[in-house]
Image: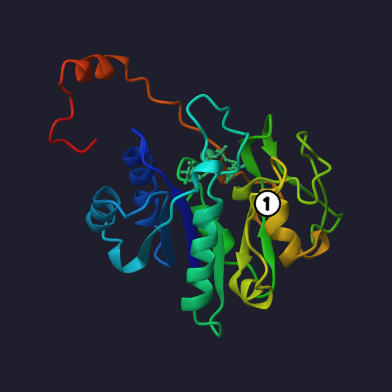
Amino acid sequence: PKIYAITPTYARPAQKAELTRLSHLFMLVPNLHWIIVEDANTTSSLVRSLLDRSGLVDRSTQLNIKTPPEFKLQGKDPNWIKPRGVEQRNLALSWLRAHVDVERHAIVFFMDDDNSYAVELFAEMSKIKPGRVGIWPVGLVGGLMVERPLLNADNTQVVGFNAAWRPERPFPIDMAAFAISMDLFISFPQAIFSYEVQRGYQESEILRHLTTRDKLQPLANNCRDVLVWHTRTEKTKLNAEEALQRKGQRSDDGIEV
Ligand code: UGA
Ligand code: MN
């Protein structure tokens, strides 16, 4: 099946580094289509030329939609007070609902631009059956080395989760822990992301429309292999750059970093 990877992204100093990592992963995964949604009023030449250079133009869709200011994190806000990527993922879902051939089996995966993904994860995802949501462990998240689904004795069903953070959530898992058969988004048109949910409930919000725990399809060696890590990039310190700019100079004059 074709895999549609949906990635919200926003301009900041490390953006090109993050997207370069992802684009190199996609060069190794032929059946993937990348829907990259910029949190901005226009698409950028940085993203366009990155797609161009990695030969992904024919296997990608570049969209943009800006997060409304009332939902955008402000400078000193801790990163968890507002959900991120809501507007962008919803735009990608409406693009998919409008453009995808509903007769063809396809998979939808929500990808942060800063996580670390193994190529093997995409082979696992390709095993997702029509009408199902595939699930696997995620490394370095929720205060644990690994968050993972717990399976029944014959490894066919998810019976629980090992989450330590808010384990009472209907689906106490990270966005990187699952991918969805496209037909479910057609069957359940009301499935979208929302700002009106508590912190950490974005995953439960989308999944509650689409599936139930007992229908999840365990992957990645009966949920024992870690093929994705919830890495987060340190905020870039630019004190010397700011000092330069106060003198009307910059280190990246005419250079895209
Ligand atoms: C965790 C999950 O991994 C995210 O998938 C989930 O959206 C987020 O929590 C949440 O609760 O909203 P975390 O690593 O803390 O993610 O979030 P980020 O990686 O900072 O943001 C998730 C995605 O949204 C990234 O691809 C990022 O580039 C994008 N984003 C972030 C924007 O498009 N605009 C922003 O202002 C901030
Ligand atoms: Mn992230």
From what the image shows, is residue 114 above or below residue 35? above
Q: Residues within 10 Å of mark 1 (few under 14, many from 20)?
A: some
- SS assignment at label 1: helix
Which residue shows up at 15% across the image and 21% down it?
249
From what the image shows, is residue 7 above or below residue 148? below
Question: In this orientation, does residue 1 appear?
Answer: no
Which residue shows up at 77% across the image and 39% down it?
163
Q: In which quarter of the image is residue 90?
A: bottom right
Which residue shows up at 32% across the image and 54% down it?
42
- Residue 253 location (% of width, % of height): 14, 31
Q: Which of 226 and 206 is in front in this view?
A: 206
Question: In this orientation, does residue 107 appear?
Answer: yes
Q: Which of 180 and 157 is in front in this view?
A: 180
Q: Quadrant of residue 13?
A: top left
- Residue 102 location (% of width, % of height): 55, 82
Apparent side of residue 256 relative to residue 29 in the rendered image (left or right): left
Identify the residue position indicated by label 1 in the image: 203
Q: In which quarter of the image is residue 167?
A: top right
Disc 1 Cβ-to-ligand 1 distance below 8 Å: yes
- Residue 257 location (% of width, % of height): 24, 35
Disc 1 residue type (three-letter):
Glu
Which residue shows up at 60% across the image and 39% down it?
82
- Residue 234 location (% of width, % of height): 45, 26
Please identify the residue farthest to the bottom as the structure is shown.
103
